[in-house]
Amino acid sequence: MQLYDLLGVAPSASDSELKKSFRKKALSLHPDKGGDPEKFKEVTGAYEVLSDPSRREAYDRYGMDGLSEGGMGGGMDPQDLFSQLFGGGGGFFGGGGRPSGPKKGKDLVHRVKATLEDLYKGKISKLALQKHVICKSCQGRGGKDGAVRTCNSCHGQGVRIALRQIGPMVQQTQQPCTDCNGTGEIINERDRCKECRGKKVNQERKVLEVRIDKGMEDGQQITFKEEADQAPNTIPGDVIIVVDEQPDPRFKRKVNDLFVDAEVDLLTALAGGKIVIEHFDNHALSVEVPAGDIIKPGDMKVLRGQGMPSYRHHEMGDLYVNLKVKFPESLSADQLEALEKALPPRSLPKSLPNDFDVEDVVMDTIDDGEAHRARTKPSTTAEMDEDEAGGGPQVQCAQG
Ligand SMILES: [Zn+2]
Ligand SMILES: [Zn+2]
Protein backbone atom coordinates (compact mmCIF):
# COMPACT_ATOMS: atom_id res chain seq x y z
CA MET A 1 0.00 0.00 0.00
CA GLN A 2 1.16 3.46 -0.83
CA LEU A 3 2.47 5.54 2.05
CA TYR A 4 0.42 8.53 0.92
CA ASP A 5 -2.71 6.40 0.90
CA LEU A 6 -1.98 5.24 4.42
CA LEU A 7 -2.06 8.85 5.54
CA GLY A 8 -4.97 9.70 3.26
CA VAL A 9 -3.20 12.50 1.39
CA ALA A 10 -2.14 13.18 -2.19
CA PRO A 11 1.53 12.74 -3.12
CA SER A 12 1.62 16.51 -3.62
CA ALA A 13 0.59 17.17 0.00
CA SER A 14 2.50 19.86 1.90
CA ASP A 15 4.32 19.19 5.14
CA SER A 16 1.55 20.74 7.18
CA GLU A 17 -1.14 18.76 5.33
CA LEU A 18 0.82 15.60 6.04
CA LYS A 19 1.14 16.50 9.69
CA LYS A 20 -2.52 17.41 10.04
CA SER A 21 -3.68 14.24 8.42
CA PHE A 22 -1.32 12.13 10.47
CA ARG A 23 -2.48 13.70 13.71
CA LYS A 24 -6.06 12.81 12.88
CA LYS A 25 -5.22 9.25 11.85
CA ALA A 26 -2.87 8.63 14.73
CA LEU A 27 -5.36 9.86 17.30
CA SER A 28 -8.12 7.60 16.03
CA LEU A 29 -5.83 4.60 15.56
CA HIS A 30 -3.88 4.89 18.78
CA PRO A 31 -3.89 1.53 20.62
CA ASP A 32 -4.73 3.28 23.88
CA LYS A 33 -7.92 4.51 22.21
CA GLY A 34 -8.79 1.01 21.07
CA GLY A 35 -7.16 1.27 17.64
CA ASP A 36 -5.39 -1.53 15.82
CA PRO A 37 -1.71 -1.54 16.91
CA GLU A 38 -0.53 -2.86 13.52
CA LYS A 39 -2.39 -0.16 11.62
CA PHE A 40 -1.08 2.47 14.02
CA LYS A 41 2.44 1.26 13.39
CA GLU A 42 1.98 1.39 9.63
CA VAL A 43 0.62 4.91 9.73
CA THR A 44 3.35 6.21 12.04
CA GLY A 45 5.92 4.45 9.87
CA ALA A 46 4.53 6.14 6.79
CA TYR A 47 4.60 9.51 8.48
CA GLU A 48 8.09 8.94 9.74
CA VAL A 49 9.28 8.47 6.16
CA LEU A 50 7.25 11.24 4.55
CA SER A 51 8.01 13.84 7.21
CA ASP A 52 11.72 13.51 6.52
CA PRO A 53 12.47 15.45 3.32
CA SER A 54 15.36 13.26 2.20
CA ARG A 55 13.54 10.03 2.85
CA ARG A 56 10.39 11.37 1.22
CA GLU A 57 12.42 12.23 -1.85
CA ALA A 58 13.95 8.75 -1.90
CA TYR A 59 10.50 7.20 -1.62
CA ASP A 60 9.04 9.43 -4.34
CA ARG A 61 11.81 8.40 -6.68
CA TYR A 62 12.38 4.72 -5.94
CA GLY A 63 9.36 3.63 -3.93
CA MET A 64 9.89 1.31 -1.00
CA ASP A 65 13.22 0.20 -2.50
CA GLY A 66 14.55 3.66 -1.83
CA LEU A 67 14.09 3.10 1.88
CA SER A 68 16.31 0.10 2.41
CA GLU A 69 18.04 1.77 5.29
CA GLY A 70 15.77 1.34 8.25
CA GLY A 71 12.85 0.86 5.87
CA MET A 72 9.36 1.17 7.24
CA GLY A 73 9.03 1.61 10.93
CA GLY A 74 12.48 0.19 11.43
CA GLY A 75 13.93 3.42 12.70
CA MET A 76 11.95 5.11 15.36
CA ASP A 77 9.53 3.67 17.85
CA PRO A 78 6.04 4.72 16.70
CA GLN A 79 5.22 5.77 20.23
CA ASP A 80 8.23 8.07 20.35
CA LEU A 81 7.27 9.69 17.10
CA PHE A 82 3.75 10.08 18.34
CA SER A 83 4.66 11.76 21.59
CA GLN A 84 7.16 13.93 19.79
CA LEU A 85 4.54 15.12 17.36
CA PHE A 86 2.07 15.93 20.09
CA GLY A 87 4.68 17.86 21.96
CA GLY A 88 6.88 17.28 24.89
CA GLY A 89 9.24 14.71 23.51
CA GLY A 90 8.57 12.42 26.45
CA GLY A 91 9.95 12.63 29.92
CA PHE A 92 9.95 16.19 31.01
CA PHE A 93 6.19 16.67 31.16
CA GLY A 94 4.52 13.50 32.25
CA GLY A 95 5.11 11.94 35.61
CA GLY A 96 7.90 9.84 34.16
CA GLY A 97 7.50 6.92 31.85
CA ARG A 98 6.28 7.19 28.34
CA PRO A 99 3.13 9.11 27.63
CA SER A 100 0.29 7.20 26.04
CA GLY A 101 -2.15 8.80 23.68
CA PRO A 102 -2.16 12.56 23.46
CA LYS A 103 0.29 13.92 25.97
CA LYS A 104 -1.07 14.03 29.49
CA GLY A 105 -0.03 16.98 31.60
CA LYS A 106 1.61 16.68 34.95
CA ASP A 107 -0.57 15.83 37.95
CA LEU A 108 -0.58 18.33 40.76
CA VAL A 109 -0.39 16.75 44.20
CA HIS A 110 -1.52 18.76 47.18
CA ARG A 111 -1.66 17.71 50.82
CA VAL A 112 -4.62 18.91 52.86
CA LYS A 113 -4.41 18.77 56.63
CA ALA A 114 -7.34 17.18 58.44
CA THR A 115 -7.73 16.74 62.16
CA LEU A 116 -9.17 13.50 63.47
CA GLU A 117 -12.29 15.45 64.31
CA ASP A 118 -12.54 16.61 60.66
CA LEU A 119 -12.37 12.99 59.59
CA TYR A 120 -14.99 12.07 62.19
CA LYS A 121 -17.45 14.77 61.12
CA GLY A 122 -16.43 15.30 57.52
CA LYS A 123 -15.75 18.79 56.19
CA ILE A 124 -15.40 20.85 53.07
CA SER A 125 -12.25 22.86 52.72
CA LYS A 126 -11.52 25.34 49.98
CA LEU A 127 -8.25 25.12 48.15
CA ALA A 128 -7.10 28.01 45.98
CA LEU A 129 -4.53 27.25 43.34
CA GLN A 130 -2.85 29.03 40.46
CA LYS A 131 -2.99 27.23 37.16
CA HIS A 132 -2.33 27.70 33.49
CA VAL A 133 -5.43 27.92 31.33
CA ILE A 134 -5.55 28.06 27.53
CA CYS A 135 -5.48 31.71 26.47
CA LYS A 136 -9.04 32.77 25.65
CA SER A 137 -7.88 35.60 23.42
CA CYS A 138 -6.01 33.37 20.96
CA GLN A 139 -7.63 30.00 21.86
CA GLY A 140 -4.18 28.70 22.65
CA ARG A 141 -2.76 29.48 19.22
CA GLY A 142 -0.27 32.02 20.52
CA GLY A 143 -1.13 34.68 17.94
CA LYS A 144 -3.48 35.84 15.20
CA ASP A 145 -4.92 33.19 12.92
CA GLY A 146 -2.11 32.10 10.64
CA ALA A 147 0.54 33.95 12.63
CA VAL A 148 1.92 30.75 13.98
CA ARG A 149 3.90 28.89 11.38
CA THR A 150 5.38 25.46 11.56
CA CYS A 151 9.14 25.70 11.93
CA ASN A 152 10.68 24.70 8.61
CA SER A 153 13.96 23.56 10.07
CA CYS A 154 12.43 20.82 12.19
CA HIS A 155 9.05 20.41 10.44
CA GLY A 156 7.29 21.34 13.62
CA GLN A 157 8.76 18.52 15.63
CA GLY A 158 10.88 20.73 17.83
CA VAL A 159 13.78 18.38 17.36
CA ARG A 160 16.07 17.60 14.50
CA ILE A 161 17.00 14.04 13.77
CA ALA A 162 20.45 13.31 12.51
CA LEU A 163 21.18 9.97 10.90
CA ARG A 164 24.51 8.31 11.36
CA GLN A 165 25.55 5.25 9.47
CA ILE A 166 27.59 2.81 11.52
CA GLY A 167 28.32 -0.24 9.39
CA PRO A 168 24.96 -1.76 8.44
CA MET A 169 23.14 0.14 11.18
CA VAL A 170 21.61 3.58 11.02
CA GLN A 171 21.64 5.40 14.30
CA GLN A 172 19.31 8.31 14.92
CA THR A 173 20.17 11.12 17.29
CA GLN A 174 17.81 13.91 18.36
CA GLN A 175 18.67 17.47 19.14
CA PRO A 176 16.34 20.32 20.08
CA CYS A 177 15.72 22.61 17.12
CA THR A 178 17.59 25.87 17.59
CA ASP A 179 15.44 27.90 15.17
CA CYS A 180 12.28 27.50 17.23
CA ASN A 181 13.80 26.69 20.61
CA GLY A 182 12.24 23.26 20.48
CA THR A 183 8.67 24.53 20.20
CA GLY A 184 8.23 23.48 16.57
CA GLU A 185 6.65 26.85 15.79
CA ILE A 186 7.64 30.34 14.75
CA ILE A 187 5.48 33.35 15.60
CA ASN A 188 6.13 36.82 14.18
CA GLU A 189 6.68 39.38 16.91
CA ARG A 190 3.90 41.64 15.50
CA ASP A 191 1.29 38.90 15.36
CA ARG A 192 1.98 37.52 18.79
CA CYS A 193 -1.09 37.34 21.06
CA LYS A 194 -1.04 40.40 23.32
CA GLU A 195 -2.67 38.62 26.23
CA CYS A 196 -0.46 35.57 26.58
CA ARG A 197 2.54 37.01 24.68
CA GLY A 198 2.64 33.89 22.52
CA LYS A 199 2.77 31.52 25.47
CA LYS A 200 -0.75 30.21 24.62
CA VAL A 201 -1.69 29.98 28.27
CA ASN A 202 -2.43 32.44 31.07
CA GLN A 203 -2.21 32.15 34.83
CA GLU A 204 -5.56 31.89 36.59
CA ARG A 205 -6.74 31.41 40.16
CA LYS A 206 -9.06 28.50 40.75
CA VAL A 207 -10.78 27.52 43.98
CA LEU A 208 -11.50 23.84 44.49
CA GLU A 209 -13.98 22.59 47.06
CA VAL A 210 -12.37 19.63 48.69
CA ARG A 211 -14.85 17.28 50.34
CA ILE A 212 -13.17 15.49 53.22
CA ASP A 213 -15.66 12.70 53.78
CA LYS A 214 -16.35 11.03 57.10
CA GLY A 215 -14.03 8.15 57.79
CA MET A 216 -11.31 9.12 55.32
CA GLU A 217 -7.82 8.03 56.28
CA ASP A 218 -4.35 9.48 56.18
CA GLY A 219 -2.93 9.28 52.65
CA GLN A 220 -6.32 8.85 50.99
CA GLN A 221 -6.65 10.70 47.69
CA ILE A 222 -9.33 12.93 46.26
CA THR A 223 -8.91 13.44 42.52
CA PHE A 224 -10.08 16.43 40.51
CA LYS A 225 -9.83 15.11 36.98
CA GLU A 226 -7.96 17.32 34.52
CA GLU A 227 -7.88 20.34 36.81
CA ALA A 228 -4.11 20.83 36.63
CA ASP A 229 -2.31 23.12 34.16
CA GLN A 230 -3.75 23.35 30.67
CA ALA A 231 -1.56 23.38 27.58
CA PRO A 232 -2.31 23.15 23.86
CA ASN A 233 -2.73 19.57 22.55
CA THR A 234 -2.51 18.23 26.05
CA ILE A 235 -4.95 16.52 28.34
CA PRO A 236 -4.50 18.41 31.60
CA GLY A 237 -3.18 16.41 34.52
CA ASP A 238 -5.27 15.79 37.60
CA VAL A 239 -5.22 17.71 40.83
CA ILE A 240 -4.74 15.07 43.50
CA ILE A 241 -5.53 15.98 47.07
CA VAL A 242 -3.87 13.80 49.67
CA VAL A 243 -5.44 13.69 53.12
CA ASP A 244 -2.87 14.48 55.77
CA GLU A 245 -4.29 13.30 59.10
CA GLN A 246 -3.03 15.33 62.02
CA PRO A 247 -2.33 13.50 65.27
CA ASP A 248 -4.96 14.14 67.93
CA PRO A 249 -3.81 15.08 71.44
CA ARG A 250 -6.24 12.62 73.07
CA PHE A 251 -7.48 10.03 70.61
CA LYS A 252 -5.42 7.49 68.71
CA ARG A 253 -6.89 5.84 65.66
CA LYS A 254 -6.53 2.35 64.25
CA VAL A 255 -8.63 2.18 61.07
CA ASN A 256 -12.15 2.75 62.45
CA ASP A 257 -11.38 2.16 66.11
CA LEU A 258 -10.38 4.87 68.54
CA PHE A 259 -8.30 4.64 71.69
CA VAL A 260 -8.49 7.09 74.55
CA ASP A 261 -7.23 7.38 78.13
CA ALA A 262 -9.83 8.10 80.80
CA GLU A 263 -9.28 8.89 84.44
CA VAL A 264 -11.35 7.16 87.14
CA ASP A 265 -11.15 8.27 90.75
CA LEU A 266 -10.38 5.57 93.28
CA LEU A 267 -13.86 5.52 94.80
CA THR A 268 -15.52 5.05 91.40
CA ALA A 269 -12.95 2.42 90.51
CA LEU A 270 -13.75 0.47 93.67
CA ALA A 271 -17.39 1.27 94.39
CA GLY A 272 -18.82 2.25 90.99
CA GLY A 273 -20.15 5.56 89.67
CA LYS A 274 -19.90 7.42 86.42
CA ILE A 275 -17.17 8.61 84.11
CA VAL A 276 -17.63 11.18 81.38
CA ILE A 277 -15.54 11.04 78.22
CA GLU A 278 -15.44 14.06 75.92
CA HIS A 279 -15.82 12.97 72.32
CA PHE A 280 -15.67 14.80 68.96
CA ASP A 281 -18.34 17.07 67.55
CA ASN A 282 -19.24 18.67 70.89
CA HIS A 283 -20.64 15.57 72.46
CA ALA A 284 -19.64 13.53 75.48
CA LEU A 285 -20.25 9.99 76.65
CA SER A 286 -21.46 9.25 80.15
CA VAL A 287 -20.33 5.78 81.15
CA GLU A 288 -21.80 3.85 84.06
CA VAL A 289 -19.25 1.97 86.20
CA PRO A 290 -21.29 -0.68 88.03
CA ALA A 291 -20.74 -1.05 91.78
CA GLY A 292 -18.68 -4.12 92.63
CA ASP A 293 -17.06 -4.19 89.20
CA ILE A 294 -13.63 -3.16 90.39
CA ILE A 295 -11.48 -1.25 87.92
CA LYS A 296 -7.72 -1.76 88.18
CA PRO A 297 -5.13 0.70 86.84
CA GLY A 298 -4.57 0.06 83.12
CA ASP A 299 -7.80 -1.89 82.61
CA MET A 300 -9.18 -1.51 79.12
CA LYS A 301 -12.87 -1.42 78.30
CA VAL A 302 -14.66 -0.87 75.04
CA LEU A 303 -17.59 1.35 74.08
CA ARG A 304 -19.09 -0.32 71.03
CA GLY A 305 -20.03 1.87 68.11
CA GLN A 306 -18.31 4.97 69.54
CA GLY A 307 -15.23 4.92 67.27
CA MET A 308 -14.75 6.45 63.83
CA PRO A 309 -17.31 6.16 61.04
CA SER A 310 -16.09 3.94 58.23
CA TYR A 311 -15.50 5.54 54.84
CA ARG A 312 -18.57 5.47 52.53
CA HIS A 313 -20.87 3.28 54.67
CA HIS A 314 -20.30 5.22 57.88
CA GLU A 315 -20.44 2.13 60.07
CA MET A 316 -19.09 3.08 63.46
CA GLY A 317 -15.96 1.45 64.88
CA ASP A 318 -15.37 0.97 68.60
CA LEU A 319 -13.86 3.20 71.25
CA TYR A 320 -11.33 1.50 73.51
CA VAL A 321 -10.92 3.20 76.86
CA ASN A 322 -7.69 2.79 78.79
CA LEU A 323 -8.68 3.43 82.39
CA LYS A 324 -6.28 5.32 84.62
CA VAL A 325 -7.15 5.08 88.28
CA LYS A 326 -6.56 8.36 90.07
CA PHE A 327 -5.42 7.76 93.62
CA PRO A 328 -5.94 10.42 96.30
CA GLU A 329 -2.87 12.49 97.20
CA SER A 330 -3.43 12.01 100.92
CA LEU A 331 -5.94 10.58 103.39
CA SER A 332 -6.98 11.79 106.84
CA ALA A 333 -6.64 9.67 109.96
CA ASP A 334 -10.39 9.12 109.95
CA GLN A 335 -10.34 7.93 106.38
CA LEU A 336 -7.48 5.58 107.15
CA GLU A 337 -9.39 4.17 110.03
CA ALA A 338 -12.44 3.65 107.85
CA LEU A 339 -10.30 1.94 105.25
CA GLU A 340 -8.84 -0.44 107.82
CA LYS A 341 -12.37 -1.57 108.46
CA ALA A 342 -13.60 -1.50 104.89
CA LEU A 343 -10.79 -3.12 102.91
CA PRO A 344 -9.62 -6.74 103.05
CA PRO A 345 -6.83 -7.25 105.65
CA ARG A 346 -3.19 -6.66 104.68
CA SER A 347 -1.53 -9.62 103.08
CA LEU A 348 1.21 -10.96 105.31
CA PRO A 349 4.86 -10.58 104.33
CA LYS A 350 6.15 -13.54 102.38
CA SER A 351 7.77 -16.12 104.60
CA LEU A 352 11.45 -16.66 103.85
CA PRO A 353 13.77 -19.59 104.37
CA ASN A 354 15.44 -19.56 107.80
CA ASP A 355 18.94 -18.84 106.48
CA PHE A 356 17.82 -15.44 105.01
CA ASP A 357 19.05 -12.35 106.80
CA VAL A 358 16.29 -9.68 106.74
CA GLU A 359 17.46 -6.04 106.74
CA ASP A 360 15.19 -3.04 107.49
CA VAL A 361 15.53 -0.24 104.89
CA VAL A 362 13.77 3.11 104.21
CA MET A 363 12.07 4.13 100.94
CA ASP A 364 13.01 7.56 99.62
CA THR A 365 10.87 9.68 97.30
CA ILE A 366 12.26 10.82 93.95
CA ASP A 367 11.44 13.72 91.62
CA ASP A 368 10.17 13.39 88.05
CA GLY A 369 13.60 13.81 86.51
CA GLU A 370 15.04 10.93 88.50
CA ALA A 371 11.98 8.84 87.76
CA HIS A 372 12.42 9.51 84.06
CA ARG A 373 16.11 8.59 84.14
CA ALA A 374 15.35 5.48 86.13
CA ARG A 375 12.78 4.31 83.58
CA THR A 376 14.94 5.10 80.55
CA LYS A 377 17.35 2.45 79.43
CA PRO A 378 21.07 3.26 79.42
CA SER A 379 21.71 5.71 76.56
CA THR A 380 23.58 3.41 74.17
CA THR A 381 20.79 0.85 74.17
CA ALA A 382 18.11 3.50 73.77
CA GLU A 383 19.84 5.02 70.75
CA MET A 384 20.18 1.68 69.08
CA ASP A 385 16.51 0.93 69.62
CA GLU A 386 15.44 4.22 68.09
CA ASP A 387 17.63 3.68 65.07
CA GLU A 388 16.34 0.27 64.21
CA ALA A 389 12.73 0.57 65.23
CA GLY A 390 11.54 4.00 64.12
CA GLY A 391 7.87 3.48 64.94
CA GLY A 392 8.50 0.89 67.61
CA PRO A 393 7.19 1.09 71.15
CA GLN A 394 8.65 4.00 73.06
CA VAL A 395 9.81 3.91 76.62
CA GLN A 396 6.90 4.91 78.80
CA CYS A 397 7.70 7.65 81.25
CA ALA A 398 4.37 9.00 82.40
CA GLN A 399 2.74 5.98 83.95
CA GLY A 400 0.50 6.82 86.92
ZN1 LIG B 1 12.23 24.18 14.74
ZN1 LIG C 1 -3.10 34.32 23.71
Image (cartoon, helix red, strand yellow):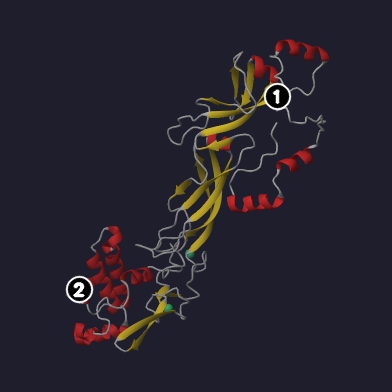
Decide if residue 73 is on the left or right side of residue 142: left
Point out the frontmost of discs 1 and 2. 1
In front of the other: 203 or 142? 203
Report crowding for label 2: few under 14, some 14 to 19, many 20 or more residues within 10 A (C-alpha): few
Q: Position of residue 305 (x, y in %)?
A: 50, 26
Q: Position of residue 83 (x, y in %)?
A: 37, 68
Q: Is the CB atom of the residue marked by disc 2 within 8 angstroms of ligand 1's nearest atom?
A: no
Q: Residue at x 61, y 13 (%)?
A: 292
In terms of secondary structure, where does tag 1 sit?
loop
Residue type at the position of mark 1: Ser
Instruction: Provide the residue designation for mark 2.
Output: 5
Q: Is residue 30 above or below residue 309?
A: below
Q: Is residue 350 above or below residue 204?
A: above
Decide if residue 156 is on the left or right side of residue 332: left
Q: Quadrant of ligand 1?
A: bottom left
Instruction: Provide the residue designation for mark 1.
Output: 351
Q: Residue at x 65, y 14 (%)?
A: 271
Q: Residue at x 80, y 36 (%)?
A: 366
Decide if residue 368 is on the left or right side of residue 132: right
Residue type at the position of mark 2: Asp
Q: Position of residue 284 (x, y in %)?
A: 60, 24
Identify the mark at residue 32; answer none if there is no mark.
none
* Position of the N terminus by quadrant: bottom left
Residue at the extreme left of the image, as rendered = 1
Q: Is residue 132 above or below residue 307?
A: below
Q: Residue at x 26, y 63 (%)?
A: 29
Q: Position of residue 13 (x, y in %)?
A: 26, 77
